[in-house]
């Protein structure tokens, strides 16, 4: 056995976890590895003041481990505020599995991940996300009770994607009401970027209302399929962000609103399902406000999925999940008004309202 010694100069590059730009006083970061299955995963527990940290497991072929860590830190933090602003008694957590879900995912790998989740004794509860499925959650259920979004046939709430899309739809309508004076989307030009399960359902909802829909995705075959199914126009240009539309709906991965894109955007409303849409929250949120572009905070309007799976914990069914998700419309309008009254961005308004709920609960817990 050969042991390599790393000198102090090499170690001094940056603190790998607590020095991460996306580290936000997270309570716990768990690195999971299993040689036999090839599992490499990170679980981020951001905050558990309101309850156990619930958040999905994303499987993605990250460029490197730094990218994976940054992603889980940003996503878990977002889940804290998503649950808080939605009135759920949940904290924020998230997990990422490093690998290509199409080629690297095996039943053995998913099972081993379930065992790691179980080792946290309920502090983190998992669910599906990009690269994982309801079937994966059913398999994890065999190894831990700390999982949601399992199949309806075994007592779960099923695929949360349709409910997530419905929440985004409600948030989009609220944004249209505030920006254009009416929540009627008929005739509105809407670009949906990313047509996975959530994106496709959103396309269906807005198409039924008479919106003029364009779609974009890296999967050309999927584009043609969804375009033909709902009569949506497939975007074929070279500069997606310069398209002349009323509403831009990012439904793929995050950070699409960044230094390279923000000045190109012609849409007057941004309302989509993707997490962490603002590359740098303070800078890009403020710039959208300066340009008169209304931003519907992502962690609010995409909360339908967690509202749906929370039903497995709180004991309510699909009807109640849809009722709570429909209320995203009212909460979105409340946040827009709060932002205007306090002269802050909509993103800051949503964060502040969520943090106020967390702080109040923290004070209650301390008084017990």
Image: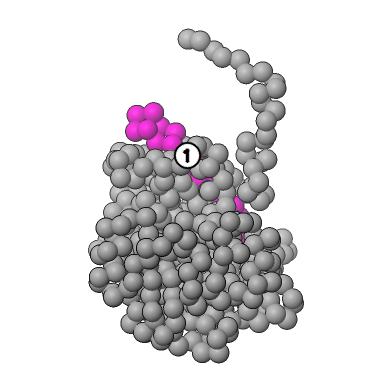
Residue that numbered label 1 is attached to: 63
Residue 184 placement: quadrant: bottom left
What's the magenta region? 33-52
Residue 361 placement: quadrant: bottom right
Q: Is residue 119 left or right of residue 261?
A: left
**Compared to 305, does 123 lie above or below?**
above
Question: Hey, which residue is sitting farthest front in the picture?
Answer: 238
Looking at the rendered structure, the secondary structure element under dot 1 is: loop
State the residue at coordinates (29%, 60%).
222
Residue 358 position within the rendered picture, expressed as x and y whole percent measured from the top left: 65, 65
Q: In the rendered structure, does residue 364 fall within the stretch colored magenta?
A: no
Examine the rendering and report whether any part of residue 113 can be seen. Answer: yes
State the residue at coordinates (32%, 51%).
136
Dot 1 surroundings within 10 Å: few (below 14), some, or many (20 or more)? few
Between 102 and 319, the residue placed more toward the observer is: 102
Residue 280 position within the rendered picture, expressed as x and y whole percent measured from the top left: 64, 56
State the residue at coordinates (74%, 77%).
342
Between 248 and 54, the residue placed more toward the observer is: 248
Residue 257 position within the rendered picture, expressed as x and y whole percent measured from the top left: 56, 61
């Amino acid at each position: 056995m050969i042991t390599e010694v790393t000198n102090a100069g090499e170690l001094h590059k940056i603190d790998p976890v607590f020095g991460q730009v996306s580290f936000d006083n997270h309570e716990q970061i768990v690195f999971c590895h299993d040689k036999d299955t090839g599992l490499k995963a990170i679980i981020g527990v951001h905050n558990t003041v309101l309850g156990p940290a619930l958040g999905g497991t994303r499987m993605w072929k990250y460029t490197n481990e730094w990218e994976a860590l940054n992603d889980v830190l940003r996503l878990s933090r977002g889940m804290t505020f998503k649950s808080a602003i939605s009135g759920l008694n949940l904290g924020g957590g998230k997990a990422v599995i490093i690998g290509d879900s199409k080629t690297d995912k095996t039943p053995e790998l998913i099972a081993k991940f379930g065992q790691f989740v179980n080792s946290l004794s309920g502090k983190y509860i998992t669910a599906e996300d990009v690269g994982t499925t309801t079937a994966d959650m059913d398999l994890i259920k065999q190894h831990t009770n700390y999982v949601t979004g399992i199949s309806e046939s075994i007592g779960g709430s099923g695929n949360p994607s349709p409910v997530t899309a419905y929440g985004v739809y409600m948030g989009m309508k609220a944004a249209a009401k505030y920006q254009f004076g009416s929540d009627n989307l008929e005739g509105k030009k809407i670009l949906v970027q990313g047509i996975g399960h959530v994106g496709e359902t959103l396309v269906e909802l807005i198409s039924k209302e008479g919106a003029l829909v364009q779609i974009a995705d890296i999967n050309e075959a999927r584009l043609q399929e969804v375009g033909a199914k709902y009569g949506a126009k497939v975007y074929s240009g070279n500069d997606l962000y310069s398209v002349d539309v009323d509403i831009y709906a990012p439904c793929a991965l995050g950070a699409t609103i960044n230094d390279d894109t923000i000045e190109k955007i012609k849409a007057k409303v941004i309302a989509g399902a993707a997490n962490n849409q603002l590359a740098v929250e303070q800078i890009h949120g403020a710039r959208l406000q300066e340009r008169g572009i209304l931003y519907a905070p992502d962690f609010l309007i995409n909360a339908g999925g967690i509202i749906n799976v929370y039903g497995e914990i709180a004991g309510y069914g699909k009807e109640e999940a849809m009722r709570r998700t429909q209320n995203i419309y009212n909460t979105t309008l409340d946040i827009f008004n709060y932002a205007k009254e306090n002269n802050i961005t909509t993103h800051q308004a949503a964060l502040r309202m969520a943090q106020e709920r967390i702080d109040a609960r923290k004070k209650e817990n301390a008084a017990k």
